[in-house]
């Protein structure tokens, strides 16, 4: 990439290369992919870097271009599994977030659900009662008020489908985490939204 290129050409190239890295290397955060590409190209001026939204648009275009018919069946199974998990954890008002809530998801990524609970122990108790083995980690997230904080993430397998539960305290309802893809409040899809998504896909295949 030549530094003499026009700024808009550089931005588009950076967005497309960041999107390719995200798709091929499984990088979830546009910021990380964008920085990696910019450093490799020696483009230090952040004013020439694309926004998260531009990277997201490039990523969707990449997935659309390289979408394979067999991926549709894999995504359908994941969404069905997500819906089953949402019904299981219904008292925590689950919402489907991440790739599966988009038009061209990555079937290699786990099902991600955002749960609301007074404390993570409530969700842990539910897992214990069901005999589900899980792992816990912390995920750094940015919130609507500009702050950064940690959210507990409980991960487990449902059959061969990896599922991640991000537990959001009730106090954060008015200050939701931001979607790392576009820096907007991450609302996700409720059961009705996921059901509608599945219905629309099946209708399109009929």
Image: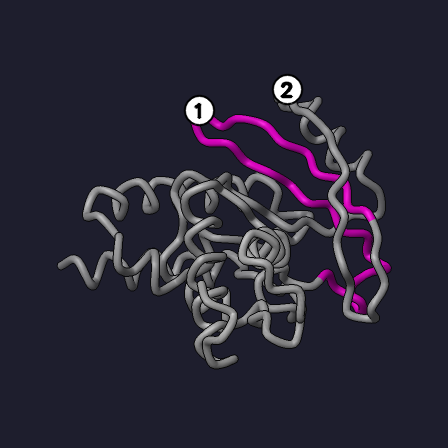
Give the residue drawn at x 81%, y 52%.
169
- Structural distance between the alpha carbons of marks 2 and 1: 12 Å
Q: Is residue 96 visible?
A: no
Q: Earlier in the sequence, mark 2 or mark 1?
A: 2
Point out residue 167 in the picture as x, y percentages from the top left corner: 73, 45
Residue identified by numbered label 1:
159
Instruction: Report if residue 143 is visible in the image.
Output: yes
Decide which of 185, 44 is in the foreground and name it: 44
Total marks shown come to 2
Q: Measuring 51% from the left and 32% from the top, which residue is drawn there? A: 162
**6 on left or right of 30:** left
- Quadrant of the drawing holding the C terminus: bottom left
Q: Which residue is disc 2 drawn over?
A: 133
Could you say where residue 85 lies in the image, as x and y percent from the top left?
Answer: 52, 40
- Residue appearing at x 76%, y 29% in the figure: 125
**Which residue is rendered at x = 65% and y = 53% of the image?**
93
**How many other residues sit within 10 Å of disc 2, few (<14), some (14-19) or many (≥20)?**
few
Dominant secondary structure of the residues highlighted in magenta in the image: strand
Q: Quadrant of the N terminus?
A: bottom left
Q: Position of residue 32 (x, y in %)?
A: 62, 52
- Give the residues drawn in magenta, as a range: 150-177
């Amino acid at each position: 990439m030549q530094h003499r290129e026009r700024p808009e050409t550089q931005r588009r190239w950076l967005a497309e290369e960041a999107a390719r890295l995200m798709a091929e290397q499984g990088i979830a955060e546009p910021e990380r992919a964008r920085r990696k590409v910019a450093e490799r190209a020696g483009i230090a001026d952040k004013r020439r870097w694309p926004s998260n939204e531009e990277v997201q648009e490039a990523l969707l275009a990449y997935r659309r271009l390289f979408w394979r018919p067999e991926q549709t069946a894999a995504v359908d199974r994941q969404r069905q599994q997500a819906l089953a998990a949402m019904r299981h954890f219904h008292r925590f008002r689950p919402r489907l977030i991440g790739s599966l809530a988009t038009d061209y998801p990555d079937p290699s990524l786990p099902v991600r659900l955002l749960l609301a609970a007074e404390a993570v122990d409530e969700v842990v108790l539910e897992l214990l009662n069901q005999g589900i083995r899980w792992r816990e980690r912390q995920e750094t997230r940015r919130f609507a008020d500009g702050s950064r904080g940690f959210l507990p993430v409980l991960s487990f397998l449902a059959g061969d489908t990896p599922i991640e539960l991000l537990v959001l305290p009730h106090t954060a309802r008015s200050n939701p985490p931001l979607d790392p893809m576009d820096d907007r409040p991450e609302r996700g899809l409720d059961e009705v939204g996921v059901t509608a998504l599945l219905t629309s896909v099946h209708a399109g295949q009929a």
